[in-house]
């Protein structure tokens, strides 16, 4: 939709006849195209209004022409005395008819250009599901200044759980929030360590955003969810610039809700004390762009400053976090001739936070809990992260029909590195009291700092180096496109111990005197201690992802467009020594689609597509699967506590019961880490829909989507099935300790693995039938119906509305697990043991059965504009999770897990029973209304804007997540102790907040 007021409406327009003609549009990640009809043999000149560059092409013998790979912006199209002004949007084709006189539509002889997915007329030249927002549109909507927030406006996209990644990440079409791809100026900037982040840029540098929510072509891959593509602002022949300030004061922010700890109500304890939370965000930008050499060399630069502060409070401590690191971007465009274009984009997105930790002195203030202010002298720490992006691109318009482009770039992203007080006291072990209170001298907050090896680099980091080359060629009714896309992703992870001081101690009380399954160890009601040790080796871990693709948009008749594409993916994941442990070549991903202009006048379009999509193996898998991991738990009696560290003194000389060991720290052999016939995870998608033009500029549409995951991938950590298989096949000398702790498989499939069956150091390739593992099939299916209605802005008002009915079901959410807030992409706990998969087939966490969306604008006067955005969504399913009971066949393995990870949970009588995933109720329906009022006074030539955005106007704070753990702990499972916080809210909608904006542009 086009949301700017009448005074600021762009003059660039496309002829309405563009909706009536037939040609081929090419959808690309960072560019657009112009296509249309004219007299065969005529020359068409396409000139950029902004930069003065031009192209001249010849209309072919069929009377059609196509100009691909145009930067978004305003253009003048001329042929045989006919001239049209048009606007090209990111990833969209703009139709321009040069064969006759303008056609009158709705009383005008020109039509405003409207972006893909929200245009006045129906685009019959594409089979994709796209939504595009320009910078003007984004500024005119009450939406957070975040690409993910705008992606949530698209139909079929829902918000994921707030505890995953940065929170509020989008889930596209049932995929997890860790299965999307992000692009800047056509360059993939997705962080594939865990897919939950991407290399960002200052938001005021964004010129447009495209959201691909389904059916995208063979040019795109490495995603099962959606694609978010950003293009940056750039210089033109006119010097332009501006400044802006965005302020979200704490004084205008409503208070959050507290969450009581029902397991300890007598002490007035809280799980979350959000009511006292304070947050103030301030950012300010200055930017300018223009010609260094007119028509040839252009530059655009932006610097963004900030001063954000957050104060949080808990039982006995509080924290103030302040962020002041500036970011920036510079873009240079050079067109030595009209046939060649060079671009360079450089972005700095480093982040730095100062952290002040205040801890209440319990001995001085024993009764002061749940503070709403800071007490005492703080410990000061600093956290740094982020990095830089460099992108270089060449585009060559070699002939009328042949265009090539080459893109090269790099991303450097440092993981958070903390120095200062939080790194002090590393000799202090982590200690929690019987009520889970943090005690001792170790650095807080939980879980404390990880202790890095002295030989490790200062920080963990990820680096991407990538190259791609694309060719576009038009011949007859075909628009052919082919390319190669190669990238290397390197993740460095330093060796480290999980806990400061080397250990984590947790005190417990045994009501019966039983400790770790051994009776009468302590007197009933007596204390004991659990000691946990965890560490891992480090290294540099590399992923190589390569792809080749070819696609054809073929205009079979004037009314029918057929699309066919084929993408070949190759993935190669290596351990720290550079040895491959997962390698897959030539994974074929076909894509097919059609668009039928039923009546030949673009008033009714029927379209559909089918395709297969692959997602790479995350580098997090390299790190977790190939490094040596030590994890063990032992239980002791003790006599006394150290007055400084609060660690136990005089522990029993030997540990009690069977120690729980899931890793001994040895490096696994690469040949034993993964199924040798492992199939990387893929998804098949089918879409069928139609769009219908209605009266007075309205369009409506309906779309059905079906998605199904094939060969889901995860790790498996039990040896019991392999031991049984070896025994059944006569391998009496087999010792399962020679196997890797965990290995990657396709759950539900037979496993091809190399094993030392004779315990002689020789590996033998074997196939172990799936029945020995006790796992069901990895499944995820998504079914949805979308209804849309749109009325583009006409100078007074406009809106877009959608309703999505969806059903999402399966045995795994995907690359994350929202039930336990686990972010280990590709190595979740879902399939670690067979018993963890029991009951897993059910409704998944992103299953929102009903979602209504409405957004748009209304011009109250020439100087006042109202923006609105509203969403109503049904709740997500919740589960009853707990610990595997002793009756489970693999309890000897699963008992070591101290995180509730199974769908076995305790009932009121204290007995474990299986409760199917997603059947423990749902969170409540939620509704959010956001409003914006913009005032554009008649000063400074109308270039000043004052704006107020109010988010969650009615301060709705419904619960969006519940505590899904029914069992109190693994240690109290046999006692049948229940978690009283089960089904209590653990997260709510964000409270009402206000953003104040002042912007000046020249």
Image (cartoon, grey):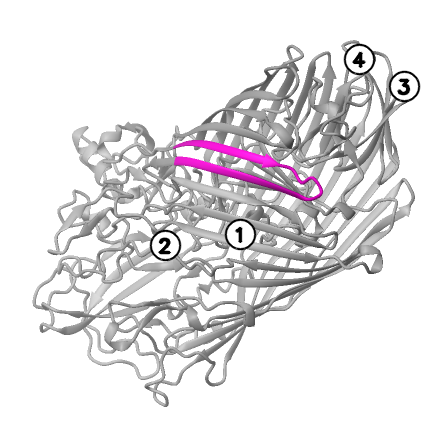
> Disc 1 vs disc 3: which is toward the camera?
3
Visible residue check, residue 186: yes
On the image, numbered disc 2 is attached to which residue? Answer: 961
Going from N to C along the chain, the mark reached first, 1 or 3, is 3
What kind of element bears circle 2?
strand
Going from N to C along the chain, the mark reached first, 1 or 4, is 4
In the displayed structure image, the side of residue 305 where residue 634 appears, left or right = left
Q: Residue at x 31, y 29 (%)?
A: 749
On the image, numbered disc 4 is attached to which residue? Answer: 60
> Disc 4 vs disc 3: which is toward the camera?
3
Q: Are marks 4 and 3 in contact (CB under 8 Å)?
A: no
Q: Are marks 1 and 2 in contact (CB under 8 Å)?
A: no
What kind of element bears circle 4?
loop
Whether residue 282 appears in magenta in the rendering, the answer is no
What kind of element bears circle 1?
strand
Q: Which secondary structure is most common in the magenta stretch?
A: strand
On the image, numbered disc 3 is attached to which residue? Answer: 80
């Amino acid at each position: 939709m086009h949301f700017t007021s009448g005074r600021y409406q762009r003059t660039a327009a496309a002829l309405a006849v563009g909706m009536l003609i037939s040609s081929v549009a090419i959808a690309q990640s960072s560019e657009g195209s112009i296509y249309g009809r004219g007299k065969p043999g005529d020359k068409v000149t396409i000139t950029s209004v902004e930069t003065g560059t031009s192209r001249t092409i010849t209309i072919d013998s069929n009377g059609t022409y196509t100009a691909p790979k145009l930067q978004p912006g305003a253009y003048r199209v001329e042929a045989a005395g006919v001239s049209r002004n048009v606007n090209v949007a990111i990833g969209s084709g703009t139709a321009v008819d040069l064969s006759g006189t303008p056609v009158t539509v709705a009383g005008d002889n020109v039509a405003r250009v409207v972006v893909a997915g929200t245009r006045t007329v129906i685009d019959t030249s594409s089979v994709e599901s796209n939504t595009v927002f320009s910078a003007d549109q984004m500024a005119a909507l009450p939406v957070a200044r975040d690409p993910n927030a705008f992606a949530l406006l698209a139909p079929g996209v829902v918000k994921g759980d707030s505890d995953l990644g940065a929170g509020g990440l989008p889930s596209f079409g049932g995929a997890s929030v860790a299965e999307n791809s992000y692009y800047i100026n056509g360059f993939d900037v997705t962080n594939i360590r865990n897919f939950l982040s991407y290399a960002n840029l200052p938001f005021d540098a964004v010129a447009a955003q495209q959201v691909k929510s389904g059916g995208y072509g063979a040019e795109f891959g490495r995603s099962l969810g959606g694609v978010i593509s950003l293009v940056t602002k750039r210089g033109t022949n006119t010097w332009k610039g501006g400044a802006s300030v965005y302020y979200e004061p704490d004084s205008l922010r409503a208070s959050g809700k507290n969450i009581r700890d029902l397991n300890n109500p007598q002490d007035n304890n809280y799980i979350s004390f959000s009511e006292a939370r304070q947050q103030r965000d301030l950012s300010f930008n200055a930017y300018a762009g223009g010609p260094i050499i007119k028509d040839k060399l252009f530059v655009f630069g932006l610097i963004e400053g900030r001063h954000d502060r957050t104060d949080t409070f808990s039982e006995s401590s509080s924290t103030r976090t302040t962020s002041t690191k500036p970011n920036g971007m510079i873009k240079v465009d050079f067109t030595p001739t009209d046939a060649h274009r060079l671009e360079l984009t450089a972005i700095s997105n480093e982040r730095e936070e100062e952290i002040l930790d205040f801890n209440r002195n319990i001995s001085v203030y024993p009764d002061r809990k749940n503070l709403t202010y800071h007490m005492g002298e703080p410990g000061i720490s600093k956290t740094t992260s982020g990095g830089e992006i460099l992108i270089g691109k060449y585009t060559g318009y070699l002939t009328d029909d042949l265009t090539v482009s080459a893109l090269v770039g790099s991303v450097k992203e440092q993981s958070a590195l903390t120095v200062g007080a939080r790194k002090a006291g590393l000799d202090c072990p982590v200690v929690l009291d019987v009520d889970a209170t943090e005690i001792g001298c170790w650095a807080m907050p939980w879980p404390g700092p990880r202790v890095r090896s002295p030989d490790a680099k200062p920080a963990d980091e990820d680096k991407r180096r990538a190259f791609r080359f694309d060719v576009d060629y038009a011949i007859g009714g075909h628009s052919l496109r082919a390319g190669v896309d190669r990238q290397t992703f390197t993740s460095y992870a330093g060796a480290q111990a999980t806990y400061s001081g080397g250990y984590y101690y947790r005190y417990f009380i045994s009501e019966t005197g039983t400790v770790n399954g051994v009776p009468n160890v302590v007197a009933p009601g007596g204390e004991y201690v659990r000691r946990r040790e965890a560490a891992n080796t480090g290294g540099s871990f590399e992923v190589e992802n390569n792809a080749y693709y070819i696609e054809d948009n073929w205009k079979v008749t004037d009314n029918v467009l057929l699309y066919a594409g084929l993408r070949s993916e190759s993935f190669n994941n290596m351990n720290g020594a550079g040895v491959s442990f997962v390698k897959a070549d030539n994974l074929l991903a076909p894509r097919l689609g059609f668009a039928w202009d039923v009546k030949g006048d673009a008033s009714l379009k029927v379209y559909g597509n089918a395709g297969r999509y692959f997602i790479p193996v995350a580098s997090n898998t390299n790190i977790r699967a190939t490094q040596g991991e030590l994890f063990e738990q032992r239980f002791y009696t003790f006599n006394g506590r150290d007055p400084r560290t609060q660690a136990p003194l005089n522990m029993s000389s030997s540990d009690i019961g069977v120690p729980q060991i899931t890793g001994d720290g040895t490096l696994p052999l690469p040949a034993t880490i993964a199924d040798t016939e492992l199939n990387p995870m893929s998804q098949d998608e089918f879409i069928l829909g139609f769009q219908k033009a209605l009266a007075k500029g309205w369009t409506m549409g309906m779309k059905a989507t079906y998605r199904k995951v094939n060969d889901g991938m995860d790790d498996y950590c039990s040896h019991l099935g392999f031991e049984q298989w070896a025994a059944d096949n006569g391998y009496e000398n087999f010792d399962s300790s020679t196997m890797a702790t965990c290995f990657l498989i396709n759950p539900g499939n037979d496993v091809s693995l190399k094993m030392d069956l004779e315990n002689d150091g020789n590996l033998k390739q074997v196939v172990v039938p799936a029945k020995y593992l006790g796992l069901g099939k990895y499944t995820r299916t998504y079914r949805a119906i979308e209804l849309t209605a749109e009325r583009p802005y006409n100078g007074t008002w406009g809106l877009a509305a959608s309703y999505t009915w969806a059903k999402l079901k399966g045995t795994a959410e995907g690359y994350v697990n929202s039930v336990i807030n686990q972010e280990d992409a590709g190595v979740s706990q879902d399939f670690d043991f067979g018993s963890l998969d029991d009951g897993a087939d059910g409704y998944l966490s992103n299953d929102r059965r009903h979602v209504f969306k409405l957004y748009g604008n209304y011009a109250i006067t020439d100087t006042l504009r109202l923006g609105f955005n509203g969403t109503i969504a049904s709740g997500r399913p919740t589960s009853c999770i707990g610990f595997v009971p002793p009756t489970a066949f693999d309890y000897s393995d699963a008992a070591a897990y101290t995180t509730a990870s199974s769908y076995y949970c305790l009932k009121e009588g204290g007995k474990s029973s299986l409760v199917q995933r997603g059947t423990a109720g749902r969170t409540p329906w939620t509704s959010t209304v956001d409003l914006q009022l913009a005032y554009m006074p008649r000063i400074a030539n109308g270039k000043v804007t004052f704006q107020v955005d109010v988010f969650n106007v009615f301060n709705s704070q419904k619960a969006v997540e519940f505590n899904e753990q029914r069992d109190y702990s693994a240690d109290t499972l046999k006692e049948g102790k229940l978690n009283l916080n089960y089904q209590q809210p653990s997260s709510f909608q964000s409270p009402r907040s206000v953003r104040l904006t002042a912007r000046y542009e020249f």
